[in-house]
Structures are given as structure tokens and as C-alpha cells.
Amino acid sequence: MKIFNKTQFHPVILMLLAVCSVVSMQSCKEDIDDSALYTFTGETMIDHLENHPDTFSCYLTLLKRVHPSNKSVSTMYELLSARGNYTCFAPNNEAITHYVDSLYQIGEETTNDLTQISDSLAQAIVFNTIIENGNNSAYESTSFQDPMPTNNMNDRPIRVTYSADENGNTQIFINIHAKVIEKDVEVENGYIHVIDNVISPSNATVADLISATDNTQIFGDLLKTTGWDMKMTNYRDYSYDEKDEAGTTYFGSSGSWEGKYPEHRYLKYTVFVETDSVLEANGITDVESLKQYLKEHAYYDSNTSWGDDYENEDNAVNQFVAYHCVAIGLSWSNMVMWSNEYGYSNANLNDGSTFRVNVWEYWETMGKHRRTLKVTGLRNNRRQINRYSVYNKTTYREIASQCEDGIEVLQTNGQNDNESLNGYYFPINDMLVWTEKVPNKVLNERMRYDICSLLPEMISAGCRLNRTASWYFTPDYFENIPQMSDQTEFEYLSNTAGAGGSGSWLNYQSDEFNIRGVYDFVMKLPPVPYTGTYEIRYGVNANGNRGMAQIYVGKNPNNLPAIGIPLDLRIGGGNALVGWQSDATLGSEDAINELDKTMRLNGYMKGPKYFCPGAGIPGRDCTNCLRRIIFTGQLEAGETYYIRFKSVLSSTQTEFFYDYLELVPKSIYNGDIAEDKW
């Protein structure tokens, strides 16, 4: 895997801060394809802006200056006059005037005359406001997501947050500061949403942004002291951009499975940060006071160093900082996923009261010690790290008296920007430390991983649950898939009906990987919290289109031992080898539990009751929604294990379904208390 440091990507990612091209200012006629113009009966985007000069004259001035690309002779003004689908967050005159004046006052611009400001500033203001939706519909406010599924023309995500005004009315904010003051202005070529501030995302790295923010100074210093600031400077793998596949459409070997390769391969990060006030409340103001705190509270092994070589990843302070960092660009909305879990309602995605049960994700943190954060999404749309939850086995609601609060994650840092060029940081309200409770209590449970959560690059690229396309990935796209044959067609499918929909089949978290060709790939498994005996379970959706795969598990990705006989994904619950019968048919709890034992002896389990694959029916009640126990054995904490799936059929059309894995300690599947059916 290539490493891209600041000096490698800095000139490219900051291209908007340099003059991008010299365009003849004497040319009055632009080279634009007249065939791309509509004969409109209503307003185009430019028509609407022109018809409201008191609001948009400044924006129009910039649109007439800026070109869609370095190679384009036409301007953004002409682009927005033509056919297409665009989402435009148009700043009003006051917003642009205030922003340019502020830069002039601090000396970043030599003038506040919009016709004379730098080309890079004019381009940045314009590009940050526009999303090119291509063949898809532009975004009206009811379809806003955080972040928006498509980046703006500056290749940056558009973030969306909500708050209530003094009268209780919902307000929409774009990238924290820009309030939408008029929404859903429908024009022939898209939607305009008027904002009261210029969208100006930070070009700092996530570590630099933390260090530059007033209330996160202590943690910013810790990032520098431990060297983790320099380990989080990557942004984009520009060698991927040069591949023929990047951004192209692919139809698969059958010629019928249309999908798209991501345009870019992003390398992003998320940091959970104690604010200065939280650290100071725990007596921490510098490295030495943190070291003393860790001696009293942390759960580190005997190899931990307590010296002053803070860049050593065995150092206690280094381990503390690393446990706050995740090599994934996690926005607020994809930190956890509300999807098709039991009782989910998608009537109002922004209303936490519609969420029936908790959701969660497990994220591997950075550093050599391979540790895990559990983020739980609570019913009121909150997120907590390392919350200990106990559930009612009938409703799967939390039993409040038996639960223990985790560390609260805050969506924003007040008026401080928490989105950087290469990721996010989120303030937390308590000390995030690898204590004995985390591996032995919080993570001593069945850990269910959607496959997406194991592939950071696809999340950072915005592909997860991105329904604008099905997605294909090249063999070297994922760091956690170190080996993939050229014959492997690795496709991601997101359910097009939408999360919570009931009209079609929905796999766990409403998506799946469906892999074809004579596939053969190796994937890194997530870490286990403590050394012990574990089961690895594979989520099955059996049908006649599937194939057969030999499974291998071990430490050496180049020489993995085979595990058992090949897995036949055509075998569903109706097959005698599985022995599935519905709970309703069995009737009594004793009969249900007895069948579960019999199925386990056959290597199978019913699907989880937790999520609903179709029409609100829990997975446990679906004949072909199963779990196959593919491995039982000892796994060691801190070690890296790999799993390999290799087709044993010669057909290129049989499908390998890949949805979720479960890592389950023996204390859960063979403990004193029977494992729940969820």
C-alpha cells in the first residue's frame, strides 16, 4: 500500500488555492455545445438567479468568471444555463460580501472587488456550492443526507445538520455555518437552496484542524507528541485516479450487471476527541499528567512502555491516542446505520423516536495493538462509545437498570468546524481509555459485522448505501483485501427501495456484496477483544443462483489452511442437511430450542431475529436466511487473522453472497446463559 504524505498530495488537494488556468479575458464568445441546451418553458438555474439580482448578483459575477475545469472554455454561468441535474446551495449577496471582506481584512486577499479576487478563491466559492447529479435527480431538502451521497464540484462532502429555532421550527445547516434560508426552488435543471453563509470547508488535515481549534488544544498536542498527526496526512490515492477503471461503468461477465467503479480512492480518518475541559476535569493538562492518569486507569499488558519515546506504538500515551483514531472517514450518519433492524420505521429518518431498537458498529482503531471501539446508536439518535447494554429477549429493548452508559459522542463542536479535508473529529464527553471493562464486558458479546464496516475505503468514498449506482472495486482497492484474483468481480449492491422498505428483499443493513467470476480473495478479519475460543459465522442468503466456496482461515494470508468442506450457498432451510422448521410450526419454546441445537450440530443456525429481510419478516422466520458456522477455534487478541473464499466451480455466473460475519466468543454461544435469538 502506497503512503501519501503531505508533500505528495498537498499541491493537488490545495489546487483551489492556486491559479488553475489562464483564460483569455478578451474572448467574448464561449465555446459551448448548443445541442446541450434545452428549449425551456420554465426557468433554468441561471434564469432564476438573473431574475433575483438583489439576492444573487454577487454569485452571478463569480459564475461568469469560473470555468468547470481547466480544459473548459465555457463558464459555470453557461453550464448552469444548460440541461442537466444540479443541486445548488446559492449564497446570497450578503454571504459572499461578508466572506470576501473578511479575507480582505486579514490580508488573505488583496482586494474585496469580486471581479479582481484571485481565481482560486472565486473557483472555491462556486465549486463548493454545486453538486453535479449527472443522470440522477437533483436533491430537494426531503432527500438530504449527512453527508450528501455526491460530493460537490470541489470533491468535498456536503454535510447537513438540523436544529430548532426559538419557535421550534426546524432549521437546516450546510457544513455547520450556512443556514438554508430558502429551500427547494425548483428549476428546469435542478434545485436551488439559498444559504446565508459561504460554504468554506477546511483544507486542514484532521489532526491540524484539531490542533487549530480553541477547545481541543491538549489533544492536538498529544497527536503531535505521539506522531499520530503525521500518520493521518493521507487524503487520496492519486495512482488510482490514473486507472482505466476509475469512474467507469462495468457490466460484469454476464453483460447484465451494471455497476460503476468509484472515481477516487480516499484515505480518511475519524478522531474522537476529549475537549480541553474534559481532560482538565480529569487532571490532565499535558503528557506527564496523562501518563499518571493511565497508570491508574488503563488496561495495558506488561510490554507497555512508560518512558518518553511517545512515538513508540507500545508507549502508553501512544496507545491512548491511537485508541481514539479510526482509519475511516466516518460522518455522523454512517458512524452507525439505522436500516432494516426489527421495528424500524423510515417515515422520518431524522426522528430518533422512530427507531425501535439500538444499532451498533464495531470500528478497529489505529495502532499495532488492534483494538475495537463499539459505537451504539440509541433510539433518540444519540451515539455512545463502549456502552454496555442488556436487552429484553422478547422485545430487544434495553433493560435500563442493567445498562451502563458509554461515552457520549457529540455531532458537532459547537460553531467550530469538525470536518477536515481528510476526515472528521467528534468531541466526546468522557475519557476514552482501553480499560479492563472494554474487552471483558462491553465486547464480550456476539459481534456482528456488516462487510462494509470492514472495508474503510468504500465508506470513505461514500459508496455505502449510495443508491446512485451498484459499485465494482478493483483488486487493489481495499487494504483489508490483500489478495484478489483478476477473475473476481467484486460488486456491492445497495437496496434501491431504500432503508426500511418492505417491498423487496433486504439483507443486513439493506445491502450486500454479490461476487461473481471464478472468484478467489483473501480478507483481513477484525480483531478479537481477548484471547479465547470463538466461532466465526457467515450470513447466508441461499438460492439457486449461488455457488460453492472453499473457506480458509489463518494468520498467513499466503498460506491459509482450508476449513471443512466447501460451503454450498445453494442449500437453504428447506434442505434436509439444514433441518430448518419455523418457530410457529414448532410451537413450544422447548421444541424451538431443541431444533436450534440440532441445526447447530449440522453447522447451521437460523437467521437473526434482529433484522427483517423482507416485508417486515424477521430473518429468523425466513427459510433461506441462515447463519453457517464456518470456524471454531482459538483466536488471540492483537493477532491478525485472514479469511479466504475460493470458488470451487468453473462457472463465472454463480454468485458468492457476502453480507455479514459474526465473531462470537465461547462465553456467548456456550455460556451459562443461552445465546439470544437476535
Image: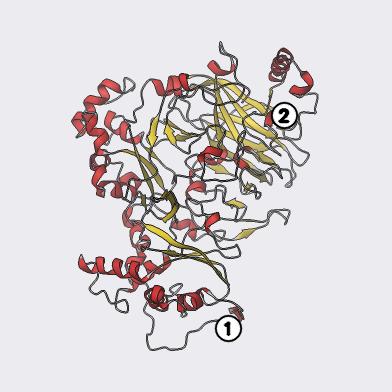
Q: Residue type at mark 1?
A: Asp
Q: On screen, 343 above or below 389?
A: below
Q: Nearer the viewer, residue 27 or 613?
A: 613
| Residue, disc 1 | 34
Residue at position x 44%, y 36% in the image: 383
| Residue, disc 2 | 621
Residue at position x 48%, y 21% in the image: 444
Q: Nearer the viewer, residue 58 or 36?
A: 58
Is mark 1 in CB contact (under 8 Å) with mark 2?
Answer: no
Whole-percent x and y of residue 393?
A: 59, 21
Whether residue 182 is visible here, answered yes or no, is yes
Whole-percent x and y of residue 16?
A: 36, 66
Camera-near label (1 vs 2) is 2
Q: Secondary structure at mark 1?
A: helix
Q: Nearer the viewer, residue 396 or 353?
A: 353
Whole-percent x and y of residue 523?
A: 55, 37
Whether residue 75 is visible here, answered yes or no, is no
Q: On screen, 61 above or below 514?
A: below
**Which image quadrant: the C terminus?**
top right
Residue that lies at the very extreme toward the top in this rendered image: 672
